[in-house]
Image (cartoon, grey):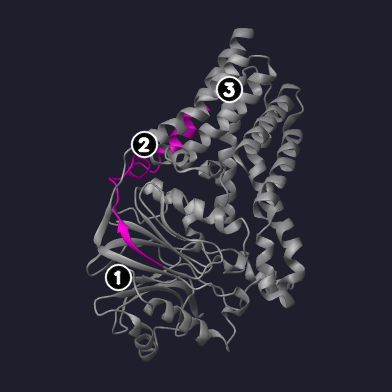
């Protein structure tokens, strides 16, 4: 959703919901308005999910359209529930109605994120249009900026509807002032780079349909190795490969690990995605993991992905869905298992980093383990599932917001793009575009002191609660004044 269409759409929805309450039409009318708006919102924002089904078109191609329609319906059903409450109140104060709309929308986002573990496309993503407009996230978090966005849009529509252009214009301050402060935050800022941490990021552009073909696995592993061994812009110490870039089990194969790490310099390391499989446990345990290897092929660290993609990495309620024939929706007969939790990885001579696998970068407030030890964020992903659609760009935008939120630079390795290095302000310093093949030789940007959103992760929810309290007080006073 673009910024201006999104602003106007939110304003119109707020007017519809408040109007349903003012006319006494109740929960279900308001809920129906929210359903229609949000279904369009999710269909437009998540159409690209259907592209993933064509990676194995013979098995899953026929499910592409029904799959997207069903996903949008589930997300819509959940997120619209709190918004239906707007219809239960005969709103006397446009100001209170606007704040209530913002609070209830964010409650809906939290509800669908908690129940589905799919927090994709929060409303704050409309601010990804520039570096400056993302900066308030450092102070008030994504939900805090989302609160201002929703309230500003709703108040604009509600005040304009009442014929009060001055308050409507004033509501624009909720949108313009944060952007202006963000612009000021970036003036004359350059955290610099660490010359002791040169990196090589590899983007091999392996087609998803070929990724797990047994006859092609060795060829695309060699492609990663050849790109890693290519002439460097300057000597590097750490090579980063994307998610699932090694198509073999590393733990039981020291010879294979030594073969792969033969392309590393003497003091170098490789961080790469690979599946971790433990057949000795009952049932067998499968993780989507990130490994850190040294030139001898020794495993120095491993991080197991915590937030798994429903249907992509596990089949929810497998016993139930399997019994009714829906097991074919899953990518395998064994579900991936979540890891123990976020961690900070430390390698000799390399600043500690927080690894994030794929869409873990979409989770606000969960980019690190909370210990304050991480000095940069590492996001490895495989967005080749989604072709050259808007999906990879949405993913990149959310990852950049994690950099702003934590005050940490971001290193992102994506199989088919977009691979980037950003500074701690989320500004892109180096980039390989979608569909490109190559490497990035870069120096690691330096971190910033932890911003408020990182030091006080519950601050955004405190702001949401405060907005709800203000709405209740203002509405109560308006009713008291008219009684």
Q: Look at the picture and state if 378 lies above or below 58.
A: above
Q: Nearer the viewer, mark 3 or mark 1?
A: 1
C-alpha gap between disc 3 and disc 1: 56 Å
Q: Nearer the viewer, mark 3 or mark 2?
A: 2
Q: Residue furthest bottom?
A: 255
Q: Which residue is mark 1?
A: 236
Question: Residue 146 at what x, y percent from top left?
Answer: 52, 38
Q: Look at the picture and state if 184 lies above or below 44.
A: above
Q: Residues within 10 Å of mark 3 (few under 14, many from 20)?
A: many
- The mark that comes first in sequence, 2 or 1, is 2
Label placed on residue 96: 3
- Residue ID at (34%, 85%): 262
Question: Residue 45 at what x, y percent from top left?
Answer: 65, 50
Give left or right: position of 411 versus 71: left
Q: Residues within 10 Å of mark 2 (few under 14, many from 20)?
A: some
Question: Residue 384 at what x, y percent from top left?
Answer: 58, 68
- Residue ID at (38%, 33%): 184
- Element class at badge 2: helix
- The mark that comes first in sequence, 3 or 1, is 3
Give left or right: position of 99 versus 350: right
- Element class at badge 3: helix
């Amino acid at each position: 959703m673009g910024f201006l269409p999104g602003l106007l759409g939110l304003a119109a929805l707020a007017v519809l919901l408040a109007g349903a309450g003012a006319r006494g039409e109740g929960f279900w009318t308001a809920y129906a308005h929210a359903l229609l708006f949000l279904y369009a919102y999710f269909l437009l924002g998540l159409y690209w999910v259907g592209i993933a089904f064509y990676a194995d078109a013979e098995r899953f191609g026929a499910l592409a359209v029904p799959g997207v329609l069903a996903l949008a319906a589930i997300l819509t059903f959940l997120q619209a529930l709190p918004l239906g409450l707007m219809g239960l109140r005969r709103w006397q104060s446009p100001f209170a109605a606007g704040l209530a709309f913002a609070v209830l929308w964010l409650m809906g986002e939290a509800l669908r994120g908690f129940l589905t573990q799919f927090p994709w496309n929060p409303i704050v993503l409309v601010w990804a249009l520039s570096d400056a407009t993302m900066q308030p996230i450092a102070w008030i978090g994504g939900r805090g900026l989302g609160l201002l966005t929703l309230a500003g849009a709703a108040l604009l529509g509600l005040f304009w509807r009442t014929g009060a252009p001055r308050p409507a214009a004033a509501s624009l301050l909720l949108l313009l002032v944060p952007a202006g402060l963000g612009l000021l935050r970036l003036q004359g800022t350059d955290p610099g780079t660490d010359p002791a941490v040169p990196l090589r990021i590899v983007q091999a552009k392996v087609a998803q349909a070929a990724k797990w073909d047994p006859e092609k696995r060795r060829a695309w592993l060699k492609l990663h190795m050849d790109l890693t061994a290519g002439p460097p812009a300057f000597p590097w110490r750490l090579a980063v490969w994307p998610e699932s870039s090694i198509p073999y089990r590393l733990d039981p194969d020291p010879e294979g690990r030594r073969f792969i790490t033969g392309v590393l310099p003497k003091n170098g390391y490789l961080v790469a995605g690979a599946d971790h499989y433990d057949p000795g446990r009952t049932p067998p345990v499968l993780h989507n993991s990130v490994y850190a290897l040294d030139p001898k092929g020794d495993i120095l660290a491993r991080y197991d992905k915590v937030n798994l993609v429903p249907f992509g990495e596990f089949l929810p309620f497998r016993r139930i869905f399997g019994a009714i024939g829906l097991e074919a929706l899953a990518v395998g007969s064994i579900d991936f298992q979540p890891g123990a939790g976020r961690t900070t990885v430390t390698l000799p001579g390399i600043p500690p980093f927080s690894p994030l696998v794929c869409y873990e970068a979409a989770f606000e407030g969960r980019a690190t383990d909370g210990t304050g030890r991480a000095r940069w964020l590492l996001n490895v992903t495989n967005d080749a599932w989604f072709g050259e659609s808007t999906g990879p760009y949405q993913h990149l935008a959310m990852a950049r917001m994690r950099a702003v939120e934590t005050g940490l630079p971001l290193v992102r390795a994506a199989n088919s793009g977009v691979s980037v290095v950003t500074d701690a302000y989320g500004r892109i310093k180096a980039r390989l575009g979608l569909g490109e093949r190559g490497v990035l030789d870069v120096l690691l940007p330096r971190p910033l002191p932890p911003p408020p959103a990182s030091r006080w992760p519950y601050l955004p929810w405190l702001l949401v609660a405060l907005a709800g309290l203000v709405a209740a007080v203002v509405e109560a006073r308006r009713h008291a004044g008219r009684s």
